[in-house]
Image (cartoon, rainbow, N blue to C red):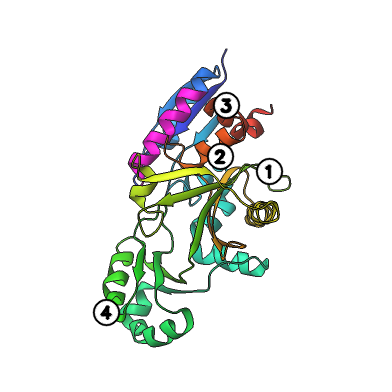
């Protein structure tokens, strides 16, 4: 009998459609590898369906809240069902940009300076009045992000004081905490990492170029909106970027698959922005290009991702 696997994708996050695409591609690859695949769109009946299906493991392809924050992983651990990707703690740590950046700072790894405020700080304690000191500390432009959101949703560049209020309102539509971060000019790099935290396998570095001000949601997923290729870097810089990515992955306790997003400042200093513990597996994502640069096709990549739960 073929090993049974459930691919969990979809959900109710703002990245639902992307998750369905990632899950569909993963399901096709798993079927091609000989697995008996069931695709589940998690809802209120998820626990019941997992108990009915009794899968050997779950391939988690849920982006954003519900998937990358540890929610689904926590349920699967209660049920005693193995799953791909980072565990509950690493997932929650990486999705929360404030907690993640604190961890990077504690590890002595470079990440752009930042402050973090919750909704109450703005609605009840006048946090908006601190703009002058924020501007003095971080400089214009600075970047305003929802603290717990993926795929660059809700990100705004604040280039002048009059843009601050609307940017806050926009970010708070996505999350009740916002991150205000120093803008770093440089090359956008994505570093895919496979395997356990204690022995990470860093794939070739992918450079992302787009006409957008940053790697936006449209640039993530619209064909042709971004150009990706293996980064051409001096050997010393390449080794530094890969080392920093591995250290970040290790410090966060990630496993199986993750993508470390960085800005290469002044062509030599890798500034860590975040780790995506469930990076997009769509045709337009950097992970696909990293696998190709490493000599793997998509099926090979999926085989690597599931190797821990399959023991192969």
Dot 4 crowding, Cα within 10 Å, few <14, some 14–19, many 20+: few
Q: x%, y% of residue 212? A: 35, 55
| Horizontal side of residue 203 vs 46, given as left or right | right
Q: Residues within 10 Å of mark 3 (few under 14, many from 20)?
A: some
Q: Is residue 194 above or below residue 53?
A: below
Task: Name the residue tied to disc 3.
Answer: 56
**Seen in the image, is 289 located left or right of residue 163?**
right
Give the foreground label among 3 and 4: 4
> Residue, x 34% and y 87% (percent of image)?
129
Percent x, y of residue 12:
34, 45
Compute the Cα span from label 1 to label 4: 46 Å
- Residue 44 position, x and y percent, is 36, 40
User: Is 223 positioned to the left or the right of 198 in the image?
Assistant: left
Give yes or no for residue 21 being in the magenta stretch. yes
Dot 1 crowding, Cα within 10 Å, few <14, some 14–19, many 20+: some
Could you tell which of marks 1 and 3 lies nearer the N-terminus? 3
Q: Which quadrant is the N terminus positioned in?
A: top right
Q: Secondary structure at mark 4?
A: helix
Q: Which numbered disc, 2 or 4, marks the residue that appears first in the sequence?
A: 4
Q: Which residue is mark 4?
A: 162
| Of marks 1 and 3, the one in the foreground | 1
The magenta stretch is: 15-29
- Name the quadrant containing residue 230: top right
- Can residue 18 be seen? yes
Q: Please check the rendered image and state whether residue 117 is part of the magenta-colored stretch, yes or no.
A: no
Q: Which residue is mark 1?
A: 196
Of marks 3 and 2, which one's residue comes earlier in the chain?
3
Q: Which mark is residue 290?
A: 2
């Amino acid at each position: 009998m073929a090993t049974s696997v459930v691919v969990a994708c979809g959900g109710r996050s703002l990245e639902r459609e992307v998750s369905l695409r990632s899950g569909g591609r993963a399901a096709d690859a798993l079927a091609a590898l000989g697995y008996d695949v069931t695709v589940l769109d998690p809802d209120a009946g998820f626990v019941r369906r997992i108990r009915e299906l009794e899968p050997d493991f779950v391939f988690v392809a849920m982006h954003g809240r519900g998937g990358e924050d540890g929610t689904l992983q926590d349920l699967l651990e209660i049920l005693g069902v193995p799953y791909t990707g980072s565990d509950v703690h690493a997932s929650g740590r990486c999705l929360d940009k404030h907690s993640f950046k604190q961890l990077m700072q504690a590890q002595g790894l470079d990440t752009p300076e930042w402050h973090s405020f919750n909704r109450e700080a703005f609605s009840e304690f006048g946090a908006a009045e601190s703009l002058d000191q924020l501007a003095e500390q971080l400089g214009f432009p600075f970047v305003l992000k929802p603290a717990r959101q993926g795929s660059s949703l809700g990100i705004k560049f604040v280039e002048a004081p009059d843009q601050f209020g609307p940017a806050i309102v926009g970010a708070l539509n996505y999350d009740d905490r916002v991150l205000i971060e120093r803008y770093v000019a440089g090359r956008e790099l994505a570093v895919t990492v496979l395997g356990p935290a204690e022995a990470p396998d860093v794939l070739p570095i992918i450079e992302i170029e787009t006409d957008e001000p940053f790697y936006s949601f449209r640039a993530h997923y619209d064909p042709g909106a971004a150009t990706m290729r293996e980064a051409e870097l001096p050997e010393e810089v390449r080794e530094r970027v890969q080392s920093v990515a591995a250290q970040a992955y290790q410090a966060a306790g990630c496993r199986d698959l993750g993508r470390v997003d960085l800005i290469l400042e002044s062509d030599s200093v890798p500034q860590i922005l975040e780790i995506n513990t469930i990076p997009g597996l769509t045709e337009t994502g950097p992970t696909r290009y990293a696998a190709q640069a490493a000599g793997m096709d998509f099926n090979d990549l999926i085989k690597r991702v599931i190797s821990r739960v399959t023991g192969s």
